[in-house]
Amino acid sequence: MPPESTLNRSPSFGSHVLRFASGSLVSKVFGYARDAAMVAFFGAGWLSDAYYAAFRVVGIFRRTVGEGSVNAAFVPALAAEKNAGRAREFFSAAWTLALGASALLCLAAFIFRRELVLLTARGFASDPALLGLTVLLTAVLLPHVVLVAASAMLQGALNAEKRFFLPQAAAASFSAAVLAYLGLAASPLGADFTMEQKIIGLAAAASASGLLQCAILLPAAARAGYLPKLSNPLSNPAAIRLLAMSLPALLAAAQDQLSLLVNAFFASFMEAGSITAIYNAARLTQFPVSLFAAASAAVALPSLSGGLLQRDPDKFRSTLDSAFRLTAVIILPATAGLLALAMPVTRALFEHGRFTPEMSALTAAVLTCLSVGLAGYAFNKLAASVFYALGDLITPLWVVGLQVALNAALCFALAPSMGAPGLTLATSISSLAAGAGFALLLARRVPGAFRPGFGAFLAKTLTAAAAMGLACAGGARLMADTPPLAAAALLVPGGVWMYFLLLRAMGAGGARELLGLRGREER
């Protein structure tokens, strides 16, 4: 590795996760501001449905590759290159390969953009204007795929060096570009343009934002010894192996996004605003998953890779235990909180401008059903990361394939009676089933993966989360007439305080200890 490698430093697992999560928090805060501004400006109707349907395909690639999932194959391969010169050569070859592959993907998607839209939003075929706008927006957004691939390789290189904050925070450039554009569109400068023209401009701003993300990451990557250069990937066997390894890893990492793509397909036959409701609900559930489950998976991957299970099985299981506990201590209360506060949180974040109370009701119902599976989404990301670290890219692919198939079957069963909420309930059930499958396979592959004491810890966490959820639900009923922003501002931090207080009372530890920010007592 380059001389300034940080791979041998040993800050706590929780500290690394905190850096990753802090960077993600910056990106997520900007993201929620972007989404709130988007629906306030355009509402939740056919225009926003067209944009989100067009963005769904690009968004799968952006979230799957851009939010650390490239680490699944790239980080272990880069970490295996012990020589600094060979590491740089491998990085340049992999970067060139990623650019070339994403450019070919972008070109193919552009040529077949109409067919792609019909595949993912078949219900739009009955409305030529809606279909035409979605096809156009897809074409405008597609170049973003190439820029995401370029920035993802820079992000992966920095993560391999255990530099986690900047790669995650840089993703805020996407939201910053969109917010800047919406500000211009709402100003007198945008007065002469129609709403259709403005949403096309929005797609252009979103597409170009990848340039800003690359510009933010490039100096840090260069300082770490990874200045990207075009090179012949065929001359580097490791880069070719990376391509073969990346395809199943990326498909597996896209589990939740593929499920939401299935949901969007069914939602395209439903009332206007259904796709937008699913998108906004998914954004809220992705907050704790991206902040902590994805962080735990990304931070654990470099530590678990390279044959650690054979060299030091105790350290492997200890790292795994830390990841499981940190994920559980955040995801379980997040589930309870979203179930209890779906309506006030939705109203506080989105009910502004053209976003009506009826839109809030639909979004909250969709969010409630999607929140049921939050633990499944989180655990699946972490479990898949463990299999990647063990060099097994096929097992996660099988589990995810079965999960997506089950999701589609459940959508057929639930959509007629439940509408859009039935689609997200299907996603929750299938994700929890996949989580159960991952747990069984992981216990067989890594005996002792769930260490003694984890069951008791999980029981305490579930008890505290359930009590917090009930208290928040009661508080929401009492504050039904309170402005939603004020209600959310009181209930959310109050629920967090109550949850950690209950955990401490049950002997599970304080917040800093539970989050891994200081050493735990021997369990």
Image (cartoon, grey):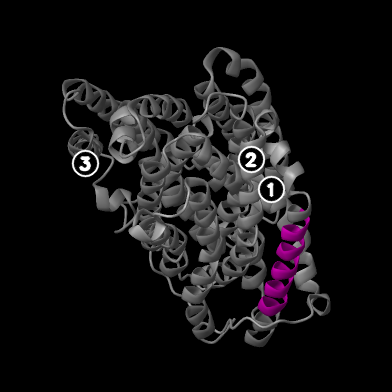
* 411 shown above or below 7: above
The image shows residue 323 at horizontal and vertical percentages of 46, 50
Q: Is residue 225 left or right of residue 111?
A: left
Please name the residue that numbered disc 1 is placed on.
251
Q: Nearer the viewer, residue 188 or 401?
A: 188
How many neighbours does mark 1 have within 10 angstroms: few (below 14), some (14-19), or many (20 or more)?
many
Please name the residue that numbered disc 2 is placed on.
258
The residue sitting at 58% across, 81% down in the picture is 226
- The mark nearer the N terminus, 2 or 1, is 1
The residue sitting at 72% across, 37% down in the picture is 118
Q: What separation in Å lies between label 2 and label 1 (alpha carbons)?
A: 9 Å
Amino acid type indicated by mark 2 = Leu
Q: Is residue 8 left or right of residue 237?
A: left
The residue sitting at 26% across, 30% down in the picture is 468
Furthest-right residue in this view: 234
| Marks 2 and 1 close (CB-CB < 8 Å) | yes
Q: Which residues are magenta?
A: 90-108
Q: Main secondary structure of the magenta part?
A: helix
Q: Nearer the viewer, mark 2 or mark 3?
A: 2
Q: Quadrant of residue 10?
A: bottom left
Please name the residue that numbered disc 3 is placed on.
493
Furthest-front residue in this view: 192
